Amino acid sequence: MTAPHPQAARHVRAVAVQPHWSAQDFVTAAAFRRWMRAQLDMARPHLNENGVNLVVLTELNGLPLVMRGGAWALRLRTFERVALALFLARLPRTLPILLRERVSPVRALQLADIDANTDLYLTTCRDLAREYGVYLCCGSAPTPRYERRSARLCRQPGLLTNQTVLLDPNGDLIGVTDKVHLTPDEEAGGVDLTPGALGDLRVFPTPAGDLGVAISLDAFRADVIGTLAAQGCTVLLQPDANGAPWTAKEGLPPDPANLRDQPEAWLESSWQVTAQRQIPYAVNPMVVGNLLDLTFDGQSAITGPAEEAPAPRSYVLTAPRPGFLALAPWVTSGEPPALREAGRHRAALSGHPMENQYREATLHADLTLPPATRPAPPRTPHEDALHALLRGEARAARPGRWPWVLAALPLALLARPLWRRRRA
């Protein structure tokens, strides 16, 4: 009897894109498509023309689509004011959702156009995955829960998660992952998203690796990493949007008084996961740029086995260490006081000549992965619905609007702030 042939290891080129965003990138569908295409253009020189490529984009890169059609409101300068102005301008759509689905004003604002924005977001990503021939982690966007009813997609009322979508080079759906652990900025006092369920996390076997997603804060949490590692994850994807100056102090639950340097805190996510050999590789792209009055900054990284890293290195404000296969440089180098000052100067509304002067970057690393041994998990009804949308087999059904007379209800509903500046 002939011995079975052992399966060959997989060789994958992982690419992390660190883009610079602005509010203007989201005010029209054409502007959004240009911004997303620019990121794949940044990735193109790093792609392996004869191999498998995995491109990973950043967290919440679909959130600012809530401003689509609202260029006139950007002069209000802060996200909170813009959100309030858009809620009022779209009252025939936002107020019925607020009352019918019993959600907050900020969630009603997002849900008012969520079907059109989800379609734009997903079809843009689909077209780019096809054109560039890559496995694409689309980043993440606020996404409702859909189910398919014939040629219509119907969303579950009120629900809106921070969701990552994975696509193959044909633009077909691989799977989706919801963020489980929300930051204060994503909870009721911020953009008011729905947390995902830990039990829903799955690993997706693909030629680009057995992919598991831990969006931003999830990559810091042992329950998420343990769940993905137990399912055989070989490549951890950590899309990120750090809503603060990179060299500022950080304090988050469960210990908000623990004010460490943010780069030090970040070592407890992807780098720690791979350094402890919980998961072999991790890809962590981070968006940069001031979005109105909100600051986003960081250093994108790809981490893996220490013996595969070219040399010890690390984020600013931390000591060099093994395990960084690729790391984006920060905007400057120097001693801690100068680094902290540089971060403050670039922050939103600082008024400094260096305000909003961040560094775009694209990183790549070659990963050697074991053969896939696990079957793909079955699709959920929501994934079936998105798969149909991407194939043009179904469209989102828009709920009927309540009469205009509802707009005359007391605007005291809007008394509390709609948007607060916290970390995403």
Image (spheres, grey):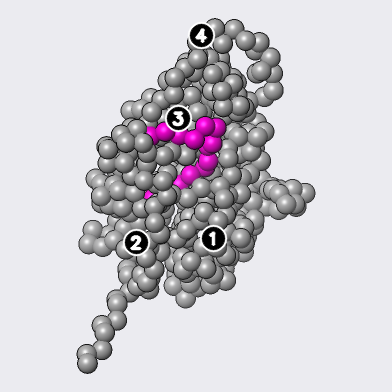
* Residue 98 sits above or below residue 20 on the image: above
Helix, strand or loop for disc 3: helix
Q: In this view, does 219 lie to the left or right of 37?
A: right
Closer to the eye: label 1 or 4: 4
Q: Give the camera-side residue of 53 and 211.
A: 211
Q: Give the camera-side residue of 36 and 310.
A: 36
Instruction: Identify the residue under disc 1.
Output: 270
Instruction: Identify the residue under disc 4.
Output: 404
Q: Residue furthest front?
A: 150
Residue 155 painted magenta: yes
Q: Do the residues labelled 2 and 3 touch (CB within 8 Å)?
A: no
For the point 27% across and 41% down, the residue is 391
The mark that comes first in sequence, 1 or 2, is 2
Q: Is the magenta stretch mostly helix, strand or loop?
A: strand
* Residue 23 sits above or below residue 325 on the image: above
Task: Read off the magenta span.
Answer: 153-166
Instruction: Identify the residue under disc 3.
Output: 114
The mark that comes first in sequence, 2 or 4, is 2
Helix, strand or loop for disc 1: helix
Q: Position of residue 390 (x, y in %)?
A: 31, 41
Residues under labels 2 and 4: Cα distance?
Answer: 49 Å
**Callout 3 environment at 10 Å: few (<14), some (14 to 19), or many (20+)?**
many
For the point 24% across and 45% down, the residue is 131
Q: Position of residue 111 (x, y in %)?
A: 50, 28
The mark that comes first in sequence, 1 or 4, is 1
Q: Is residue 351 visible?
A: no
* Residue 319 sits above or below residue 399 on the image: below
Instruction: Say which quarter of the image contains residue 97.
Output: top right
